[in-house]
Image (spheres, grey):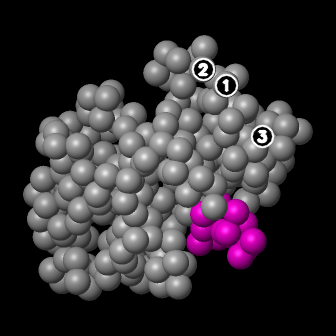
Amino acid sequence: MLELHSVTAGYDPRTPVVRGATLTVPPAGSVGLLGPSGCGKSTLARVAALLHRPDAGRVLVDGTEVRGWRHRAPRALRTSIGVVFQQPRLSADPRLRLADLIAEPLRATGRRDLVPERLAALVPAVGLTEDLLGRRPHEVSDGQLQRACLARALVLRPRWLICDEMTAMLDASTTAALVAAVETCRAETGAGLLAVGHDRVLLERWCDRTVEWADLTASPTESPADA
């Protein structure tokens, strides 16, 4: 279970972006978080991904309460969560070829021996071709780069996947392909999914349950830093 209880978070404790949010994602389940741009849902997604320390509240991953955030979180917790962000060009190292981008989490966790096997499985699963793996981010389209970022999020076979506006910048065909890739991988691994977005139709078709931002928190505050 991925659990957020009464989470308050932001970038200035005096003006929180998220106030009192409670959200639960069940094992192997999928939850959509629906809300307008700027409402704070990306901040909450970063809290759920252990990338942003909340000002108040509790986060539990598989029953373990999170005490540290980012690099201070235990490796077992960090690697149990995969994240795909809205803007792939801001989340991808421009110096890395796509093959290295995808394999980066494996190398960072000392699992280099798994690189060939995981690349062979994930590259076709996300709709990439072998000829793209030697290119750098500036040499591929947004859709191709986002496919690589999805593969990177899945390469450690996380128990939880957080997709924060993953398809917001993409066309309908690429959106459908990425959602299908996520569901194929989830069917194989049993990963739970938190999908954040503002497209009601997409989230309701994709997820088991969709939660409205207005029903989730107490008086959310807009922030220009939040997507």
Between residues 28 and 194, which one lies in front from this camera angle? 28
Q: Is residue 150 left or right of residue 35?
A: right
How many C-alpha atoms fall within 10 Å of the one at disc 3: few (<14), some, or many (≥20)? some
Residue 163 placement, left or right of 146: left
Q: CA distance from mark 3 to mark 2?
A: 22 Å
Which residue appears at 26% of the width and 85% of the height? 214
Q: Residue 113: percent from the left, percent from the top?
A: 60, 14
Residue 69 image-quadrant placement:
top left
Q: Amino acid at mark 1?
A: Glu
The residue wearing badge 3 is 136
Q: Earlier in the sequence, mark 3 or mark 1?
A: 1
Upstream in the sequence, badge 3 or badge 2?
Answer: 2
Q: Which residue is mark 2?
A: 114
As for residue 7 lying within the magenta part, the answer is: no
Q: Gap between marks 3 and 1, in whole Å?
A: 21 Å
Q: Closer to the observer: label 3 or label 2?
A: 2
Magenta-highlighted residues: 167-179
Disc 3 marks a residue whose amino acid type is Arg
Residue 187: x and y, percent?
52, 51
Relative to 219, is 141 above or below?
A: above
Residue position for label 1: 117
